[in-house]
Amino acid sequence: MKRTRHKRRGGLSRETEALMRMAIGLSESGCRAEDQHWERRLTVAIDDMLRAQDEDGLNAALDTLHAQHPQAYEELADFIESRAECASGISEDHEILLIGAPVLAWSRYKIPASTIVPAVLSNLRVHLQAHIVAENARIALADFLFSPDQLPQGYCATAEFAAALGRAALEGHDLHIATEGLPETAQFLSDTRYLLAAVAVPRGEPLFAWQEEGSNRDSAFTRWRNQGGACLAPIMPGCATEVVLPEAYFAASRHADSHSRPYSIRASVAFLGAELDTPAASLRAVIAPFHDEKLEEYRIGFSVRDREQVVHGVVWPLLGAEDEHSDIPLQIESVLRDCGVTDIVNQEHRFPLEYCDDCGAPMYPSAEGETVHAEMPESHGENTPRHLH
């Protein structure tokens, strides 16, 4: 049941105003002792709001601080994420953490988002325990490979999911996901899938392998990439895949978003090379900024050199603190050159954030300085995805 929210001045609840005051206090703290005071109070306040399903209150505090006190916003955002993914209140003796294991994939066919069969789930658990989580950790996996649209939406839903998966870890079994009612997954050439798990350890003990002697993140990731990633092949037929280091849920999601941008360009060049029998050196890429009220993203339109038609496109969204002063075009150009694309046009014109009225696909920049619909040549089938996610 939702707790009654007492409205105060400015439309903010008492709980939201208190949360903001604590976050500001933490951001202005000058010593570790004061940090610990604010952290204890924030822990109690956020846990109460998560249990009360007060998503609006949490978001109102973040929105207000984002505009008025950026440093306090960062402190509060980190704290809310950490409390949502830690399954608080499930056990007094154990620490529990929701982790995500992202998988980047591209395919000219549909990228699966589906139930994971027991044999594959068992293999994934073995490799997570061997390479990623600490030696004494208990682990439970959700038996579904999630698309981004199917992940828990919001902090409160994430906390509920972490609690359910955390209980499964303590009880020694995996969590079955009922697929009825899950959102449909849109078809993109390149997209991300998520394996979700909960890790439970006695309080004070390491959660991850790289917290223990003799291991580090790089070696753990190398082992997971070489061995764990191969376990996904049976449930991702027809897909080229690349794994991202499994870690705490929100950090894993952010890293997946970051890694997916260059990956989508590499996938696009590989796809066009196979579909059009065109080497990367024969492609032209047009990079352009797209604005709404501010710069929102860059889009890359691909065409075959000496032809006007834009045959494919990639969206490169801005993440975190990136803005028009960031060196995004240089990053995109570097990825393109690494792929073998040398004919690169940088459009400085501010394009509007336009989408096709008929199919909703993004409009991409052409070398002529226009926004156009990306269309593969007529000789290619209708089932080929129109753009990269």
Image: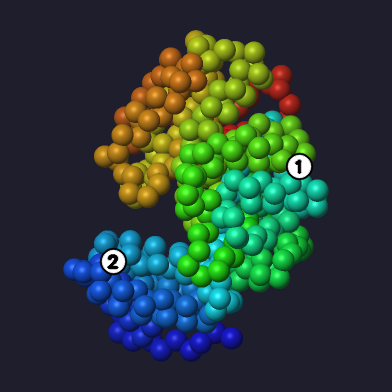
Dot 2 falls on a residue whose secondary structure is: helix
Image position of 326 (left or right of 176): left
- Using a 10 Å C-alpha cutoff, classify the residue at mark 1 as few (fewer than 14 neighbours), some (14 to 19) or many (20 or more): some
Residue situated in front as seen by the camera: 301 or 370: 301
**Which of the two labelled residues, at mark 1 and mark 2, occupies the earlier sequence position?**
2
What kind of colouring is applied to the model shown?
rainbow
Q: Position of residue 327 (x, y in %)?
A: 31, 34
Residue situated in front as seen by the camera: 218 or 234: 218
> Which quadrant: the N terminus?
bottom right
Image position of 35 (left or right of 383): left
Dividing the picture into quadrants, the one containing residue 330 is top left
Please determine whether, in this image, residue 253 is positioned above or below residue 76: above
Query: Are circles 1 and 2 on residues that touch, CB within 8 Å?
Result: no
Q: Position of residue 242 (x, y in %)?
A: 59, 35
Please determine whether, in this image, residue 23 is positioned above or below residue 243: below
Q: Which mark is residue 22?
A: none
Image position of 86 (left or right of 125): left
Question: Which residue carries the number 1 mark?
Answer: 235
Image position of 52 (left or right of 287): right
The residue under the point 43% across, 19% down is: 337
* Residue 170 appears in view: yes
Residue situated in front as seen by the camera: 297 or 365: 297
Q: Position of residue 146 (x, y in %)?
A: 66, 52
Q: Amino acid at mark 1?
A: Ile
The residue under the point 71% across, 41% down is: 232
The residue under the point 74% across, 32% down is: 238
Q: Which mark is residue 72?
A: 2
